[in-house]
Image (tube, rainbow, N blue to C red):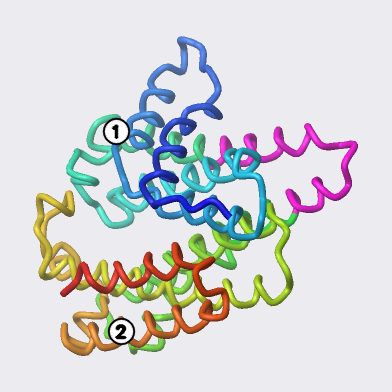
Amino acid sequence: MEERSFDEYKELVDQHLMDFIPNIDNKSISLYESMKYSLTAGGKRLRPVLLLAACEFAGGNIKEAIPYACAIEYIHTYSLIHDDLPAMDNDDLRRGLPTNHKVYGDAIAILAGDGLLNCAFEAISKDMMLFYDSPEKIRKRVNAAYEIAKGAGVRGMVAGQVSDIEAENAIASKEMLEYIHLNKTGALIRAAIKAGLYLGNPTDSMINDLEKYSENLGIAYQIADDIMDVVGNPDEMGKAAGSDEKKHKNTYTSILDIDHARNRLDELTAKAVESIEKYYDNAEFFRNLVLDLAKRTK
């Protein structure tokens, strides 16, 4: 299997990111500019990279996975635009730049998020239309689309966002916090990996193992983010340090303190690595990804 680095996958995503954003007439140019502003404002591209890596891990054709990788980044970006709005987190900065609503206003920001969500499923459904004569390829794509829709919706990311809002200004338990982030952050990570696998040729065992990996990765990713919010460099993070504490958000560092949060991160990292041990060097990308996550918080 061809080995690629995170940056190689990311470059591939960046090359194609605007491919599935339709041309918009002059009357809607502000919508297009608003969508493009947030899409091209940088970012790690973690979710589309995971989708492409999972596809190759399962023996799939990475070129066929491009529409799905871009779609999941559209969904992630829409969620960030809406998350930054005054009615949600009311953030002024995202990735070191003014948030979408600060540039285009609340109404256009909301519609840009709506537009990106629909562009995601337009890209996926258009790809499906190319394979009417191949039941096997259609089956793969339907499974991938289902995982993405489920991960983004009321049984995934949206549910986590609601729980997060309702837990504000209250003291959440560690269990409640992990439920929130298993959905708000983890659901789309899990969806990316499972969708990528389905676009390849996965075994049932592979799907189960990588699902366990993705669940541990999703929570570990959020814990690392919470730690960096306290100890990280604002210039590198693209946002002010301690922003979650100022908003009275429940985080792993506020509930567990930094040392216990790091211990929990190490536990989840070990579980993630354990779930893919039997794949040896074939899973090196996934192993290194979660190990690097823990390293950056030290």
Of residues 221 and 253, the one nearer the viewer is: 221
* Residue drawn at (19%, 71%) of the image: 297
Q: Is residue 188 magenta?
A: no
Label 1, label 2: how many angstroms apart (C-alpha)? 41 Å
State the residue position of label 1: 105
As displayed, is residue 278 above or below residue 175?
above
- The magenta region covers 117-142
Point 42% across, 25% down: residue = 31
Residue 119 visible here: yes
Tell me which residue sits at (18%, 67%) in the image: 228
Q: Quadrant of residue 272?
A: bottom left
Quarter of the rendering occupied by the N terminus: bottom right
Position of residue 224 in the picture relative to residue 117 (left or right): left
In the rendered image, the vertical position of residue 67 relative to residue 182, given as above or below: above
Q: Amino acid at mark 1?
A: Gly
Q: Main secondary structure of the magenta part?
A: helix
